[in-house]
Structure formats: structure tokens, C-alpha cells
Amino acid sequence: MAEYDFEITSRPSYSLLKINLKDQEIMTETGSMVYKDNSVNIETSAKGGVLGVLKRAVVGESIFMNKLSGSGRIALAPGYSGDIVHHELNGTLYASSGAYLASSSDLSIDTKFGGGKTFFGGKGLFLMKIEGSGDVFLSSYGAVEEIDLNNESIMVDNGNLVAFTGDLSYNLGKVGGLKSTLLGGEGLVYNFSGTGKIYIQTRNIESFIDFITPYLPTPKQG
């Protein structure tokens, strides 16, 4: 059962997370708050000290986090258009860069190094590691799709990955050889196997940037 009384509205393009705190506290990504009742307190801190700050900076997350506490209404949203999904955690969840929105305050948040197998993984090199029992709210670029694996395997594009549960085995690699990678329009992919859950986003922000870049104005040469 979820810890918070919450509702996700305006899905999937411009999702808004509304939570009614009842003498509770929640950790959120800085810059995600849309509004709050005056009865709700807000405290900004560098959770995990200097080491925690450095790790979150490496994974691409804000170096600070907000703790909202008390009783009253709050609303949260990511900085880009997309969806929000709730995950009831009992174990470990790995989230890609930018996917974390909020979570129960007593969950452990750390950064996982993928090891040599992801050395050429770019943004897949580091993942946010969330452990414990509680609620996690993730955001996406585009809509969120859930994939449940039951002793199965699947390949997911690195740019479309949002998060996955820690009971899955995985590695990050290239699609085919160098020729197919360069000419086929595909890059790095996650290969998952086992039993667990994967969250993907229906749009790839890196592909969108590549699409609009040719249309951007270029500085005039003086």
C-alpha cells in the first residue's frame, strides 16, 4: 500500500504529481515543486554529505534535495514535458539520469557505477541506486511504459530507459557491429534478463535534440 495520498493528473504529456501530506515528509528533486500549502515546510540540503553531492553530480542529478514536511497539499512536476509514474519499492531500483522526481524520506539514495561493461556507456555509465521500502516517483520524457519480465530477456535503447528493478541482470553494449551502429541509427542498448520490472519512456530526448539541431539558427560571423 502506498505511503502517500497522491494523484497524478494531466497524463501523459504534462503530468503533475499532487500529494496530500498528513504529518509526513518526502524528499524531492530541487526545482520540481509547483506549489505547496503554507503549512508545509521546505528544507534544502545536500543529502549524503560531500560524497553524496559528488555522486549525484556525476549521475546528472541536482546536488541538492528538498525535504517537504508537515500536513498540506504539494504538487511536483519535472522540468520537461512527459509522464510521472509511481513505484512501490521493496528492494532496489536503478534509475537513469534525470528520472528521479521524489521518494519516501527514509529510502537510501546512492550512485552505482556500472563497471567496465558500461565504460563506453555515456549517460549509462552511472545509475541512481534507490534502496529500501517506500514510494518512488519517476518522471519521463514522453509517456511511461511498464515492461514485466518473467524469466525473459529484452533489449532497451539506452536513451529510452527510465528505471529497472534490482533483481534483473543487465549489461550495456552496442547493437551489432560498428557499421550497423553508425548507419542504422541505433547506439547503445541495455540487455536485460531475468524476472523483474522495467520502465521505459516513449521518446528519446537525445534523438529529439539531434532532430532539431539542424533547424537551430547559427551565430552570424562578424
Image (cartoon, rainbow, N blue to C red):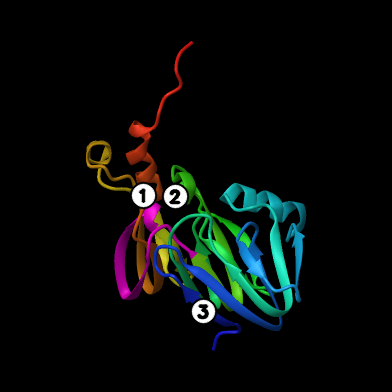
Could you say which is closer to the camera, residue 176 or residue 4? 4
Q: Which residues are magenta?
A: 139-160
Three-letter amino acid code at disc 2? Lys
Q: Residue 1 vs residue 190: left or right?
A: right
Q: Earlier in the sequence, mark 1 or mark 2?
A: 2
Q: CA distance from mark 3 to mark 1?
A: 37 Å
Q: Which residue is mark 1?
A: 173
Q: Is residue 127 above or below residue 106?
A: above
Q: Secondary structure at mark 1?
A: strand
Q: Which residue is mark 2?
A: 117
Three-letter amino acid code at disc 1? Gly
Q: Nearer the viewer, mark 3 or mark 1?
A: 3
Residue 133 among those drawn in magenta:
no
In the picture, the disc for residue 29 is none
Q: Which residue is mark 3?
A: 7
Q: Residue 196 vs residue 25: left or right?
A: left
Q: Residue 112 vs residue 11: left or right?
A: right
- Asked which quadrant contains residue 31, the reply is bottom right
Q: Earlier in the sequence, mark 3 or mark 1?
A: 3
Rendering coords of residue 187 (x, y %): 33, 45
**Residue drawn at the location 30% of the way across and 72% of the way down:** 152
Q: Residues within 10 Å of mark 2 (few under 14, many from 20)?
A: few
Q: CA distance from mark 2 to mark 3?
A: 39 Å
Residue 158 among those drawn in magenta:
yes
